[in-house]
Structure formats: C-alpha cells, structure tokens
Amino acid sequence: MAAMSDYLENKIIDLVLRGQAFTAPANAYIALFTVSPSDSGGGTEATGGSYARVAVSGALASWAGTQSAGSTTASTGTSGTTSNNAVITFPTPSAGWGTLVAFGIYDASTSGNLLIYGSLGTSKTINTGDTVSFAIGTLSWQIDN
C-alpha cells in the first residue's frame, strides 16, 4: 500500500484549505529503496552501480486517471487511484543495488521532497546487469477514501 508523505499532506492542506500556493513538479522522480521510508521521509535509497531516479512527466499521458492503465483523461469517479501509463525503466545496474523493498516518488532527481512512497509487495535483489522496471499499470497508489 502506498501513502503520501507528511510533506505532501501539509502542502495539500495548505493549498485546499489555507489558500497557499503549491506548484506541482514538472516531473515525478521514481526512487527505489532497500529500507522503506515513512510519512516523515527517511528510508535508505538504493545507491551505486549506475543507480539513478527515473523522471516521469507530470502529465495526463504519464499517469492513468482511473484504475484503468492507459487512461489519459483527468481523474473521475471514486477510486482515487492512479498508475503509470508507460513502462518505467531504470538504468542497467553496473553493480548490485541490494534488496529493494519500496519505491518513492520525489519532486527532484536528487535530494528533494518525498511525495509518495509504498512497498514493492515482493522484495527483489538487484544484481549487475538486471533489468529493473515497472510494467504499465504496476506502479500505483490510491488516496484513502
């Protein structure tokens, strides 16, 4: 299950209820973790061996607007769910990245603010030369309703 970080929760409250501006990032940067983060951040992001966050455009074409992967219309209905509309592929590891257990979505390619995070469901040990990717519709999260 995925969740919003404290940072994003506060930004949404300030935007919706307190009239404070919030500019959505142009890209979401997908990160992988060997130790899961929490609402307050933390966790241990994968490092070394050509690891880098992957940029995904903040656009209707990039994220499904309903529970159906491939949807390019604005969100409607009651699901509060989105998922990736294209395969998200990380650089090929030139060394092991350890055992991945979680993903995170940031507003920057390095450092930045954690926006969303979640468990991978099944942990995966990444070795040199492995293909590391999320198939269409498999990186998803839902706002609790």
Image: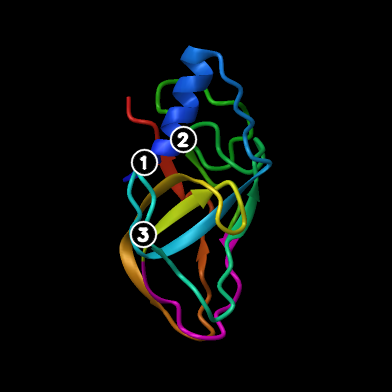
* Quadrant in which the C terminus is drawn: top left
Q: Position of residue 141 (x, y in %)?
A: 41, 41
Which residues fall within the magenta stretch? 88-100
Q: Secondary structure at mark 2?
A: helix
* Quadrant in which the N terminus is drawn: top left
Report the residue at 54% width, 55% height from top: 30
Residue 135 seen from this side: no
Instruction: Sort mark 1 into few (<14), some (14-19) or many (20+) by Cα contacts within 10 Å.
Output: some
Residue 115 seen from this side: yes
Q: Secondary structure at mark 1?
A: strand
Residue hosting label 3: 43
Q: Which mark is residue 8?
A: 2
Which of the two labelled residues, at mark 3 and mark 2, occupies the earlier sequence position?
Answer: 2
Report the residue at 44% width, 44% height from top: 116
Classify 104 as above or below 83.
below
Q: Identify the main secondary structure in magenta.
A: loop
Q: Nearer the viewer, residue 38 or 99?
A: 38
Q: Position of residue 66 (x, y in %)?
A: 50, 32
Q: Nearer the viewer, mark 2 or mark 1?
A: 2
- Asked if the residues shown at circle 3 and circle 2 are in contact, with their CB atoms under 8 angstroms apart, the answer is no
Magenta highlight on residue 8: no
Magenta highlight on residue 90: yes
Give the amino acid type for the residue marked by disc 1 in the picture.
Ala
Is residue 23 toward the left or the right of residue 9 in the image? right
- Asked if the residues shown at circle 2 and circle 1 are in contact, with their CB atoms under 8 angstroms apart, the answer is no
